[in-house]
Every structure is written in structure tokens, then in C-alpha cells.
Amino acid sequence: MSENQASLKNRVAVVTGAGSGIGKALSVGLAEAGASICCAARTASKLEETVSEINDKGGKAISIATDVTDYDSVKTLFNFARDSFGGVDITIINAGKGSNGHQSIEDGDPAEWQETIKTNLTGAYFTAKAAIPCLKESSSGKIILMGSGTGYRSVPNASAYACSKSGLWMLTRSLAWELLPYDICVNELIPGPVKTDMTADLEEFFNSKMGRSEWFKRPEDVVPLAIFLATQPNKGPTGQSFGLNRREL
């Protein structure tokens, strides 16, 4: 067993957006590192695939269909995880929605804009809020929020996504300050471009329209940084942003 694999033994992680893409890869990767995983997403059938993959490899995983935009649903998620595994040590806030169809503010759909903010920012707030009582009971509480370089640098026709991710970074810092007395570390992980169903059209956008060449990662490439953050000392780092971008934000 490697050092990373040993480091998460007896830890419990809740991962939102665990049915596919980065969330699925993180669930599998943290399970391989020794953690028990509670997988959450809207679509139960996709969650079953993630759980089966983990359990077939000898890991421990359960799942519950969860809508992060519904606070009662998120509270049910953490109660389920605590009742099933005895507590929660790590919360990965990964559930999210992509940009609003690459539409300008003038031409975009206001309802779509609101839905993106509701999912990416309010959903993250709900998840963190519901996680805090569990994490206070842990001796190694960690929150990792899945950020984006777009939250730091505006790009054309993605206002809702950019604003939601910019808000997510400030939420990270607010949580870090508030949870400092409890030794709960809160950090943002910026994966950079990752090939998923949600980002299928972004490689051409980055490499031609934006005039820059970027490393388009597989979801599995994000796992080592997440494990690094999940295994840091209780005193920190916290309130920081860690990125896998090839270039500066």
C-alpha cells in the first residue's frame, strides 16, 4: 500500500457530482486511497455505476440521489453518510453546471443564468453548511471546493459560470476563516480544462479562439491534488487556491 493509500484509511468522504466526470474519478481515487465514500448526484443510475466500480475493486461506497439546490436534500445526504459510516471527514463540493450556452449577457436567458448561480454557488453553500456539523465531529475535517480559472479571469459569453465560480472562491475564503477555530481546512481546487461531457467543446475554444494551448486533462488527473489536500495537516493550508492549470490564472 502506498503512502497516499494508507493516508485516507478510516476516513469518510462525501463527494457531490459523483455520477460522472471529475466527481466519479475523485470518488474512485479517494476510495483507492482508503477512504469510504458517500457518492451524491441527481441521477441514481449513474451513482450506481460509481459505487459498483468502487466496491468491485474492494473499496467501500454508498450513494444517495441528491439535489444540491435543495437544502433539505443536502441535509439528508449528510445524515445518511453519518448514519452509514459513523461520521464525515472530507467533503468534496464538485456538483456544478457549465456555462450558459456561450451566450452574451444581452442575448442570454435570465432563467439559465439564475440556474447556473443556484447550482454552482448556492448549491456549494448548501453543501458546506450541511457538512459543517459532521466535520466539527471529525479530527481531520476538510472541505475541497471545485473552482475554475474562469472565476479569476473573465472569458466571453460565460457570465453566469464566471460569476458563480468567482463567488465560490470567496465562499472558500469565508468558510476557511469561520472554521479556523475548529481546525477544518477549506481549499479551492482548480483543475483547469478537463475532458468531460460538460466540456466537450472547450478544447477548440481554448486552443483557437483564445489563442492559447492548455493541458486538457482526464478526470483521473485531478485525483492526486485532491488527495494531497485531503491529507494535509489540520492546521493548514486553508483558505488557499490550488490549480492544475498550465499557465497562470
Image (cartoon, helix red, strand yellow):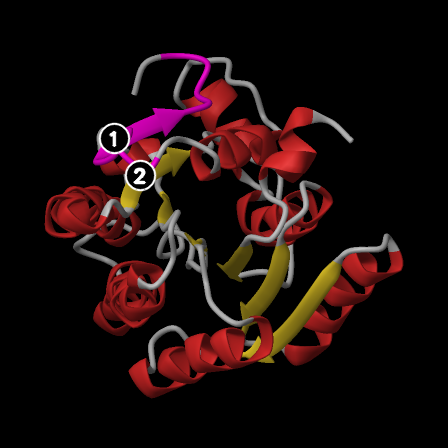
210 or 13: nearer the viewer: 13
Residue in the image at 73% along x and 27% along y? 2
Is-magenta flag for residue 139? no
User: Is residue 59 in view from this perspective?
Assistant: yes
Write the start and end of the magenta stretch as one range: 234-247
Q: Earlier in the sequence, mark 2 or mark 1?
A: 2
Q: CA distance from mark 2 to mark 1?
A: 5 Å
Task: Tell me the number on the disc at residue 187.
Answer: 2
Does the CB distance between marks 2 and 1 fall below 8 Å?
Answer: yes
Mark 1 is surrounded, within 10 Å at the Cα level, by few (under 14), some (14 to 19) or many (20 or more) other residues, namely some
Q: Quadrant of residue 151?
A: top left
Mark 2: give few (<14), some (14-19) or many (20+) Cα within 10 Å: many
- Can residue 115 be seen? no
Can you tell which quarter of the image residue 240 is in?
top left
Secondary structure character of the magenta stretch overall: loop
- Residue that extends furthest to the right in the rendered view of this protein: 56
Which residue is tagged 1? 240
| Location of residue 169 in the rendering, given as x and y in whole percent from the top left corner | 22, 42
Q: Position of residue 234 (x, y in %)?
A: 32, 37
Residue 13 locus on image (x, y percent):
52, 57
Quarter the N terminus occupies: top right
